[in-house]
Amino acid sequence: MPSKTLAYAYNGTTTSLNTGLPRNKMNEYTNVQFHESQGAALVPAKEALFGRARKAKDRIHWMFPPDKDERVESLLTWIRAVSYSLGTFGLHRFLQSRERGALIANADYRIAGGKNEPAFDWLTFDQLQKTRDRIMQESAAFYDPTAQAIVFVFLPSKSGNSVAMWRQKINVPNNMRLMLQAEVSLALAALRREEDYVVHVDEYVAACFR
């Protein structure tokens, strides 16, 4: 990673997250809500995530320790603290899109009036395929969306040309899966076959099998 990106990714702030429960508590019908950025949180990193001028390995970097930046460390801690509700939220987004995908959050983005809580976006496999990053694509292609939710956390460089990226896998609560069993069965039946998930990388394009 270029030195400017490294310096920015490691440049923490004093911002901390509220590590309590999400602002809207989940009722018995799984009415759990999180802030969603509607794509706004991805704009500062659009070139880093989806640019074609540079290879994915030069745009998306996976090796940074999360404890080197307080924004990232706080967000990952918050995700673990609300994993029950966030796992349910991930299941809902899967059921809504009827496609495998992942939640993604910009560690440096907050919605105005959002009580300093993160904002998430849902990217389907087809959208993640456009990153040409193998880890992001395989994470979404070969997980059980009824048992886990995939969450990506990223921190953009100051230029927006690169991002540091982290991944969390959180469990979907068993009682939520059972409560939504009919909807889950319909969504699973609509999924493409595993061999039809094709991972696109810069060097070549290949079907990826477990």
Image: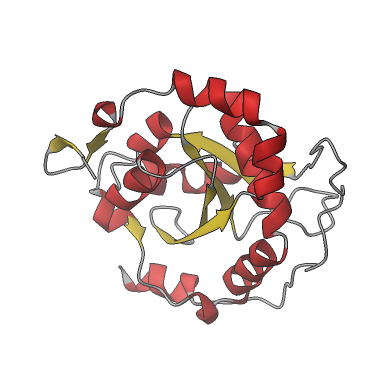
Residue at image location 49% in from the left, 77% down from the top? 10
On the question of residue 61 being in view, the answer is yes
Residue at image location 36% in from the left, 39% down from the top? 141
Q: How is the image coloured?
A: secondary structure
Quadrant in which residue 128 is drawn: top left
Residue 197: x and y in percent read: 29, 31
- Residue lying at the far bottom in this picture: please name it: 68
Residue 109: x and y in percent read: 65, 54
Q: How many numbered circles does the render carry?
A: 0
Question: Quick check: 9 left or right of 177?
Answer: left
Q: Is residue 182 above or below residue 34?
A: above
Residue 32: x and y in percent read: 79, 42
Q: Is residue 56 above or below residue 178?
A: below
Of residues 10 and 202, the one nearer the viewer is 202
Of residues 204 and 26, the one nearer the viewer is 26
Q: Quadrant of the C terminus?
A: top left
Q: Quadrant of the N terminus?
A: bottom left
Question: Quick check: 140 left or right of 58?
Answer: right
On the question of residue 98 being in view, the answer is no
Of residues 36 and 95, the one nearer the viewer is 95
Of residues 56 and 171, the one nearer the viewer is 171
Residue 77: x and y in percent read: 65, 71
